[in-house]
Amino acid sequence: MLADRGSEWMSDAKWMEQLQGILDCSLRQFQLPVSDWRSNGTKTNRATKSSRSTSAIKVGEHMVGQEGQLWFALYADGDAITVLEIGKHQLSETEKRLLGWMISLLKSTQSAAASNVTESERYARELGAWITEQLELPDTQLSVPEHLMARGRLFSSMIPFLLVCEQADAAGSSYMELEKLLRSFLADDVMLVPLKQQEWLVLGPVSLIRDAQSEEREGDQEESVEESLASITLGLQEMLTSEWIGECHLAVSQPISPASSIIATTALLRETIHLGRTFHVGTNIHLPWLLHLERLLSTIPENQRAKFVEQALKRTDFFLEPEILSTLETFFSLDCNVSETAKKLYIHRNTLLYRLDKLKQETELDVRQFSDAVLIKIVLLLYKVTKRK
């Protein structure tokens, strides 16, 4: 019989990606009222389903939809059925039966595995499946459905982190193991929500900010919220790298109310990690409030980026010199302060001035002038991307 949505059927979309590659066609998951499932089928299907209840519809059962697409039943949610739509019309009856059998077998296997899953993990996987589904739709539902509200917990203000792991075998890591690490480092009431393969959304209490500010307070000076979030994220990334699965990427944003903002925030954090990995290779902490310029530059078509770099610089190969790259990156990170940059690079101030003069000579741009500094910063970001193409 068709299973309830309580199982973690769609928490892992890997099998769908594999199936899509095998069939070489699009797949789509959506919900359909039971009445529509009955009325939209072929005459043969209608004759066999006319008096069925939801619980009588079998996993893997198929029918032809309104536009001739092939539909397979996955699971029930009240009066609705979640359907897998196969964007391919020319399948033999044998192929259809094989697909139905495969779906039924996968569901049976996952249901057996789900019997050992805790209620909190089952809920987290269901919430993660809903978030992933919404992010792939053109028109997203911004508010979390009532049945996923976790007894009102998502109305509380929480700190959202997005964790992406580099290692492929991270997907097989225990949910409970990762949750335990996060609770020991952050707080007992942290929420861990699995999304795609090697990707997790972490929701922590806002009290973490107050704790970080009290620990770092020096005299009357207090950290800003953004500084506290950055230090929390850095500590979390270091802990996960050493105690869990190895290298990983983390993004964080300002506290949110997940009930109304979880979709938009997850999309922002995904974009933040993408921008960070694109423009700042080797960096593992990605902060959205530091990537405004990168977000703007990412909208420029790739063919226009290289063209802009060539037109802006007299010598594009000059940026290949590691000494110039490290000097400029340090100079910009320290707000164009010559003295602080020299200290950070462990060189004499005059040595730094010599390098900046050499930059001016080779590119006809003086990084100590505001307009030139802005242009060089833009060119540096674009060049680091275009030279890897």
Image: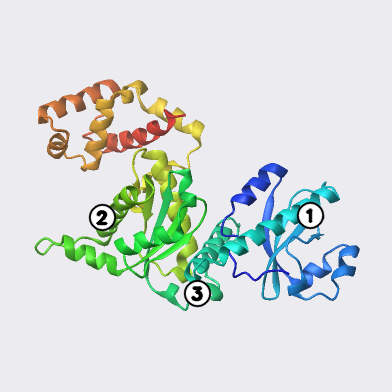
Q: Earlier in the sequence, mark 3 or mark 2?
A: 3
Whole-percent x and y of residue 209?
A: 27, 65
Whole-percent x and y of residue 206?
A: 31, 68
Q: Which residue is mark 3?
A: 149
Q: Earlier in the sequence, mark 1 or mark 3?
A: 1
Spatial CA distance of label 3 from label 2 is 30 Å
Whole-percent x and y of residue 115?
A: 56, 67
- Position of 277 relative to 34 (above/below): above
**Does residue 320 appear in this view?**
yes
Q: Which residue sits at x=30%, y=38%?
A: 374
Three-letter residue code for mark 2: Ser
- From the viewer's perspective, is 378 left or right of 87? left
Spatial CA distance of label 1 from label 3 is 34 Å
- The quarter of the displayed image where residue 107 is located: bottom right
Q: How is the image coloured?
A: rainbow
Q: Which structural element holds mark 1?
A: loop
Q: Which residue is mark 2?
A: 231
Q: Earlier in the sequence, mark 1 or mark 2?
A: 1
Three-letter residue code for mark 1: Gln
Three-letter residue code for mark 3: Met
Q: Which residue is mark 1?
A: 69
> Which quadrant is home to the N terminus?
bottom right
Name the foreground residue: 27 vs 19. 19
| Mark 3 neighbour density, 10 Å: few (under 14) some (14–19) many (20 or more) | some
| Mark 2 neighbour density, 10 Å: few (under 14) some (14–19) many (20 or more) | some
Q: Are marks 3 and 2 in contact (CB under 8 Å)?
A: no
Q: Are marks 1 and 2 in contact (CB under 8 Å)?
A: no
Q: Which residue sits at x=61%, y=63%?
A: 112
- Position of 224 relative to 23 (above/below): below
| Mark 1 neighbour density, 10 Å: few (under 14) some (14–19) many (20 or more) | some
